[in-house]
C-alpha cells in the first residue's frame, strides 16, 4: 500500500471503531481531503462491516456520518477543556508577544491567568517558528514556556505528568539553545530534562521526543555516530507504537546525520524513511529526504543516480521558494556537476554560492563551499588558484571567533594545496572536519 494513502488494515480498525485516537484522527483528516482512492476503498469495505452492513446500501451515508461524528467529537469534558485552553493560549501569547522578554516574564510571574497548559503549548509552537527566523528570540520564548510549566496546576496534572511537561519544556530549551549555538547551556538543559523525565510517567513517546532533540545537539557538536545510535531507541519506540510516519522521521534524521560521515549508511536510512513517511502530514519532509538522498548519492560516487533523484524532486523545490532552500538546490547542482566532470559549470555555481552565503553571514557554509570550489579548481589543474582561494578565505575566518583548532586545520589545508600534497583524499577529510568540529575543537587527521 502506498504510504500516502490509508493502510487497509487501519481503515478497517477505523470503520469498526477499534482504532487508536491518533489513527482515527489520521484517517478522518485524510478522508476529509477527498482522496478518491481511499474513499472508494472505504465504500467497498463498509459493505460487510457492523453498522454499515445492518443498514444496507440505503443507510450507508447515514452510518458513515455517524462514524465521522464519533471520530470528530471530543472524548470527554477534559479534552474539550484542553482544546478551549489551547485557543485561549493563542490570545494570551498575542498579548505577551509585543513585550520585551523581561516584561513578559514579569507579567507571567505576576498573573495566574497565564499559568495554563494552552499558553505553554502555544509558546512551544512559537519557539519552533523562531528557531528558524530568530534563534535568540526562540530561546527567550522557550524560557517563558519553562516558567509557565513550573507554575501549572499540579493538582490537575499530577506530579508525574507535571514532571513530563517540565522535561518537555527543558528539552525544547536545549534545542533552542543549540540553534543559538550556546552548547554549554544546551547540554545543561538536556541533562535537566532527563532528570525530570525519570520522575515522570515513563511514557515512551516522551522519551523518544527527548532523544530526537538531543540527537540534533549531538550532531552539532560532532558526535555523529552517538547521535545515530541514540536514535535507534526512538525508532524502536515508534515502531512499537505503530506510527510509521514517526519512524520515517527518525530514519530521515539518522540519514541526514550519518550521511556526512558515511554516505552509504545515510542512503540506506533515507530509503527506509521515504517508504514510511506520510508526506500529507509534513510535505516539507519529502524535499528534505530527496535532497539528502541526492547529495549522499553524489558524495558516494553515484552522480548519475543523484541527478535522477534531483530531477524528480524539482517540483518540490518549486513548492518551497525560500532563499535558503534555493541556495541548497544550487549547491547540490554544483556538487553533481563536479562529480559528472562538468567542471566549468561547477566552478561557476560554487563561485556564485560563495558570494551569496558570505553576504548572509553563513560562515560554516562559506567554508564548505570554499572547499568544494578549491576541489574543482584543483581538478582543472589550477592548484595555485585553489591555494590563493584558501588564503583569502583564511583572512576572513580569522574574524569569526573560531576555536584555534579550526584555524590551524585551515592552515594545514592551505599548505597542502600550496604544495600539492595528499590531494586525493584532502578535500573529503577537510570537509568532514568542518562538519564535525565546527563548534568544538578536534584534530585534523591527514594520514
Image (tube, rainbow, N blue to C red):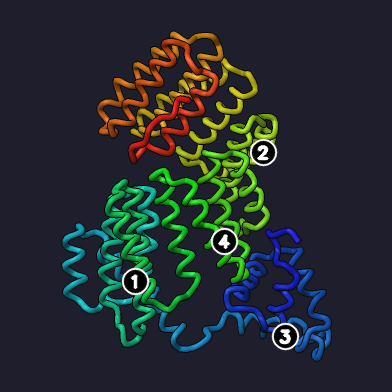
Classify residue 240 as left or right of residue 15.
left
Which residue does the numbered mark 2 point to in the structure image? 309
Disc with the residue nearer the chain's start (4 vs 1): 1
Q: CA distance from mark 3 to mark 1?
A: 46 Å
Q: CA distance from mark 2 to mark 3?
A: 45 Å
Q: How far is the residue under mark 4 from the one under mark 2?
A: 26 Å
Q: Are marks 4 and 1 in contact (CB under 8 Å)?
A: no
Whole-number angstrom distance, CA of label 2 to CA of label 1: 43 Å
Residue topped by disc 1: 196
**Residue 445 position by quadrant:** top left
Query: Do we see residue 122 in this rendering?
Result: no
Mark with earlier residue (4, 2): 4
Q: Is residue 286 left or right of residue 134?
A: right
The answer to whether mark 4 and mark 2 are in CB contact below 8 A is no
Label 3 vs label 1, nearer the camera: 1
Give yes or no for contact between labels 3 and 1 (Cβ–Cβ under 8 Å). Answer: no
Amino acid at each position: 500500500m502506498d504510504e500516502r494513502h490509508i493502510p487497509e488494515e487501519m481503515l478497517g480498525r477505523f470503520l469498526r471503531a477499534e482504532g487508536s485516537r491518533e489513527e482515527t484522527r489520521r484517517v478522518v483528516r485524510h478522508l476529509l481531503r477527498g482522496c478518491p482512492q481511499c474513499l472508494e476503498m472505504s465504500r467497498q469495505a463498509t459493505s460487510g462491516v457492523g453498522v454499515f452492513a445492518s443498514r444496507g446500501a440505503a443507510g450507508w451515508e447515514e452510518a458513515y456520518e455517524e462514524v465521522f461524528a464519533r471520530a470528530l467529537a471530543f472524548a470527554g469534558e477534559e479534552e474539550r477543556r484542553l482544546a478551549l485552553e489551547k485557543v485561549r493560549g493563542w490570545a494570551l501569547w498575542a498579548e505577551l508577544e509585543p513585550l520585551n522578554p523581561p516584561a513578559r516574564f514579569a507579567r507571567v510571574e505576576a498573573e495566574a491567568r497565564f499559568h495554563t497548559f494552552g499558553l505553554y503549548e502555544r509558546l512551544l509552537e512559537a519557539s519552533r517558528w523562531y528557531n528558524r527566523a530568530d534563534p535568540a528570540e526562540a530561546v527567550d520564548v522557550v524560557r517563558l514556556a519553562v516558567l509557565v510549566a513550573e507554575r501549572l496546576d499540579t493538582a490537575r496534572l499530577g506530579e508525574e505528568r507535571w514532571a513530563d511537561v517540565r522535561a518537555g519544556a527543558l528539552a525544547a530549551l536545549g534545542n533552542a539553545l543549540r540553534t543559538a549555538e550556546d552548547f554549554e547551556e544546551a547540554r545543561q538543559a538536556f541533562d535537566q530534562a532527563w532528570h525530570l523525565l525519570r520522575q515522570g510517567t515513563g511514557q515512551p513517546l516522551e522519551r523518544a521526543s527527548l532523544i530526537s532533540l538531543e540527537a540534533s545537539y549531538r550532531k552539532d557538536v560532532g558526535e555523529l555516530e552517538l547521535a545515530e545510535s541514540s536514535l535507534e531507541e526512538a525508532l524502536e519506540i515508534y515502531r512499537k507504537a505503530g506510527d510509521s510516519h514517526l519512524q520515517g522521521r527518525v530514519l530521515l534524521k539518522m540519514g541526514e546525520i550519518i550521511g556526512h560521515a558515511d554516505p552509504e549508511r545515510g542512503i540506506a536510512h533515507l530509503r527506509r524513511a521515504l517508504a514510511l513517511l506520510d508526506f500529507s502530514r509534513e510535505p516539507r519532509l519529502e524535499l528534505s529526504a530527496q535532497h539528502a538522498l541526492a547529495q549522499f548519492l553524489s558524495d558516494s560516487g553515484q552522480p548519475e543516480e543523484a541527478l535522477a533523484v534531483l530531477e524528480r524532486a524539482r517540483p518540490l523545490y518549486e513548492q518551497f521558494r525560500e532563499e535558503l532552500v534555493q541556495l541548497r538546490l544550487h549547491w547540490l547542482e554544483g556538487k553533481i556537476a563536479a562529480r559528472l566532470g562538468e567542471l566549468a559549470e561547477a566552478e561557476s555555481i560554487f563561485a556564485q554560492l560563495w558570494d551569496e552565503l558570505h553576504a548572509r553571514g553563513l560562515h560554516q557554509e562559506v567554508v564548505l563551499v570554499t572547499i568544494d570550489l578549491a576541489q574543482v579548481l584543483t581538478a582543472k589543474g589550477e592548484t595555485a588558484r585553489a591555494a590563493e582561494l584558501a588564503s583569502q578565505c583564511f583572512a576572513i575566518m580569522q574574524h569569526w571567533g573560531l576555536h584555534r583548532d579550526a584555524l590551524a586545520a585551515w592552515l594545514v589545508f592551505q599548505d597542502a594545496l600550496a604544495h600539492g600534497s595528499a590531494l586525493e583524499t584532502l578535500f573529503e577529510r577537510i570537509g568532514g572536519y568542518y562538519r564535525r568540529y565546527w563548534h568544538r575543537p578536534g584534530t585534523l587527521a591527514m594520514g
